[in-house]
Amino acid sequence: MIREGDKVLLIDRRGKRYLVTVSDREFHTDLGILKLGDLIGKDYGSSITSHKGEEFRVIKPDINDIIAKMRRGPQIVHPKDAGIIISYAGISPGDTVIEAGVGSGALTLFLANIVGPSGRVISYEVREDHAEIARKNVELAGFSDRVTIKLKDIYEGIEEDYADHIVLDLPQPENVLPHAVEVLRPGGYFVAYTPCTNQVHRFFQAFQEYKKEFYKPRVVEVLVREQEVKKECMRPKTTMLAHTGYITFIRKL
Ligand code: SAM
C-alpha cells in the first residue's frame, strides 16, 4: 500500500516516467494536474487520473528508475558495467565496499542496493561539488543509512582497516594497490573501471609488484546489443552504446 512520503513512479500513456514523492500536493504535467495525495492508500499497479482525464499507472521505483532520474555531474558507470562488477566480484548483502571516486554516485547506488541495510559503502571523492551531488543522490535513493561519502584522495591512503571489496572508477587505480593490499580481505576483489586501454596497460605494469598477493587478473569489456522486435522482423537495433570502459578484476589471496 502507498503511504505519504513514499517515492513512486508514474507512467503516462506515452511511456514517459515521473519519479515523485507522495504528499498532499499537486503535480503538474502536460497531460494535466495530478493530486498526489489521492495515491495514499492505493496499491502499486493501480492508477491515478489527471484533471484532463489522463491515466497514469503507479509502480514502485527500482534502483534503475532512481539513477535515471537523479542529478548527474561526471559520467556515470552504465548499468551493464555495474551489473558485471557486482556479479563477477560476488558482491553480496552485508559486504563492506570501499569505492572511489564517487562522481555522480550511480555506482555507489548500485553497490548500496546490493549490500543492503546490513552492508556498508564507503566512498572517497576529491571534489566537493561531486561529493555534494552524490550525497543528494544517496539521500534520494534512501541509502544514507549505509553509505558514507568522504572528501578525501584515496591515492593518499584508505582510512578503514577492512574491506570485502574495493571498487574504483578513477584515472589511476594502480595508485590504490599499495593501500588495497593492507585492507582487502583474502578472497575480496579489487575492481578497476577505466575507459582507456593505456590505463589498463599502466595498471598491469604497476600490478607486477603486487601479483603474488592476488589471484590471476581478469579484464572484460561488456557489450550489450539491444534487439528491435517487430511483427515481421527481429534484428539488432542499428545504434549501440559501443564503448564505455574496461573492467579489471583482481582477487586478494
Ligand atoms: N562511478 C561514478 C558514477 O557512477 O557516478 C563516476 C565516477 S567519475 C567518472 C570519477 C570521479 O573520481 C570524479 O568525481 C573525480 O573527482 C574522482 N576522483 C579522481 N581521482 C580521485 C582520487 N584520487 N580520490 C578520490 N576521488 C577521485
Image (cartoon, rainbow, N blue to C red):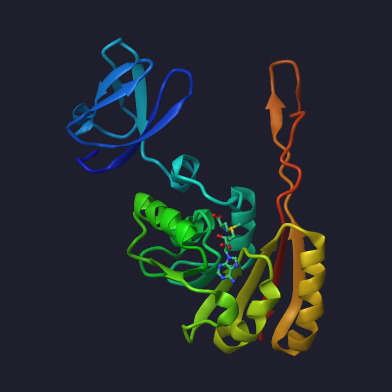
Q: Which residue is rendered at x = 37% and y = 58% of the image?
A: 143
Callout count: 0
x, y percent for residue 122: 45, 71
Q: Is residue 137 left or right of residue 188?
A: left
The N terminus: image quadrant: top left
Q: Which residue is rendered at x = 74% and y = 29% of the image?
A: 237
Image position of 108 with respect to 228: above or below: below
x, y percent for residue 221: 75, 55
The C terminus: image quadrant: bottom right
Give 148 or 47, whichever is nearer the viewer: 148
Q: Is residue 213 left or right of residue 10?
A: right
- Residue 147, located in which quarter of the rendered image? bottom left
x, y percent for residue 49: 29, 18
User: Does the image show residue 121?
Assistant: no
Name the quarter showing ligand 1: bottom right
Image position of 71 with respect to 175: above or below: above
x, y percent for residue 107: 54, 57
Give 241 or 187, whichever is nearer the viewer: 241
- Residue 227, located in which quarter of the rendered image? top right
Image position of 106 with respect to 192: above or below: above
Q: Which residue is rendered at x = 32% and y = 64% of the image?
A: 145
